Image (cartoon, rainbow, N blue to C red):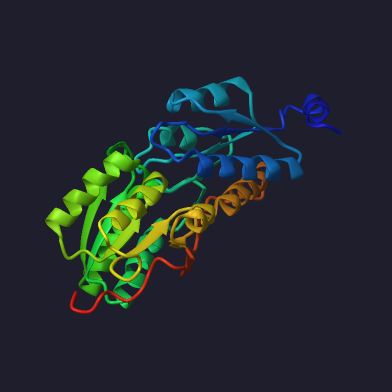
Amino acid sequence: PNAGARALASSRSNIIALMVPLRTDMYVPVMMEIAIAVATTARTHGYDVLLLTGEEGPDAVRRVTGSGLADAMILMDVELDDERLPLLRGTDQPSVLIGLPADTSGLTCVDLDFKATGALCVEHLAMLGHRDIAVIGEAPAVYERHTGFAERTLDGLRSRAQELGVRLLHRPCEGGYDAMAVTLARILDERPGTTGFVVQNESAVEPLLALLRQQGRAVPEDVSVVAVCPDQVAMQASVRLTSVAIPAQEMGRHAVERLVAKLDGRGTDEVVLLAPELTVRASTGPAPSGTS
């Protein structure tokens, strides 16, 4: 029977609410890929998905829990100290976070292990002999909100750099050519010996490669670039990028499976961290001699 008929026969709506606050500083294709994975996986379990894209935070959670609109919730764009969490802990309604807050007690979370991702990027460049690494991050607002994935990546980058004795400089960037030009100029002014770049900002990837080209810095002969981005972005860049992919489909699928288990009374609170995988392509190579 269809979801509507089943819902009438029980007190369930057979709807999962997916909360994706769409902000201007977000890379929407990744969010949508996760959302599509949530919707297709939910269908296989007989659930429809209601997409809530507003930025109301706790009010959106209250609306869902108080209305019977949906049986359960999946929340995205999770901040370290997310203001929606007290409501989730205080309701019987099952929920799963795609993202990792600072305190995961009483919650079920699915995410890429972004701390390990940051560490992996630094390790790769350090193994190639790079001692001065610059990180081109997300837009400043992403860090001001303490968005979990960005903070955790940075944590992994910094702690591994310290362990390996590598110098690390992190600069947020709005993305786009003009912002990237200013950011790169500042980095090279402050650390002229920079030979390794880690980019966690899809809209900065191509501008960075173009600017390096214009300055006569060959990739990977003079500088190496590692990106944290979808494979599609890495493969379509003007230099095929060594990258850690965002497993968007896996994240969406795991979240729904954990949620359905909870709805069936089988689920427990747990944190599922997906291990990062680094794929070496054409943008990384040995540090130029004389840089260490």
- Quadrant housing residue 83: top left
Q: Is residue 32 left or right of residue 14?
A: left
- Badge count: 0
From the viewer's perspective, is residue 28 above or below residue 242?
above
> Is 180 left or right of 232, judged from the image as shown?
left
Residue at 45% of width from left, 61% of height from top? 244
Nearer to me, 110 or 124: 124
**Quadrant housing the C terminus:** bottom left
Q: Is residue 91 above or below residue 199?
A: above
From the top left corner, tell me how far across and down residue 149 is, in percent. 39, 49
* Residue appearing at x 25%, y 75% in the figure: 288
Q: Please tell me which residue is depicted at 36% across the width and 42% down the height of the picture.
A: 147
Quadrant where the N terminus is found in the figure: top right
Residue reaching furthest bottom?
289
* Residue 269 rendering spot, x and y as whole percentages: 53, 50
Q: Which of 179 and 162 is in front in this view?
A: 179
Residue 224 position in % (x across, y down) = 33, 66
The image shows residue 18 at horizontal and vertical percentages of: 57, 34
Residue 139 visible in the picture:
no
Residue that extends furthest to the right in the rendered view of this protein: 1
Q: Is residue 277 above or below residue 38?
A: below
Task: Identify which residue, 13 or 229, lies in the foreground.
Answer: 229
Task: Spot the residue most to the left.
Answer: 190
> Could you tell me if residue 129 is visible in this image?
yes
Instruction: Name the residue nearer the viewer: 211 or 243.
Output: 211
Residue pictured at 28% horizontal, 40% vertical:
178
- Image-based side of 76 in relation to 134, left or right: right
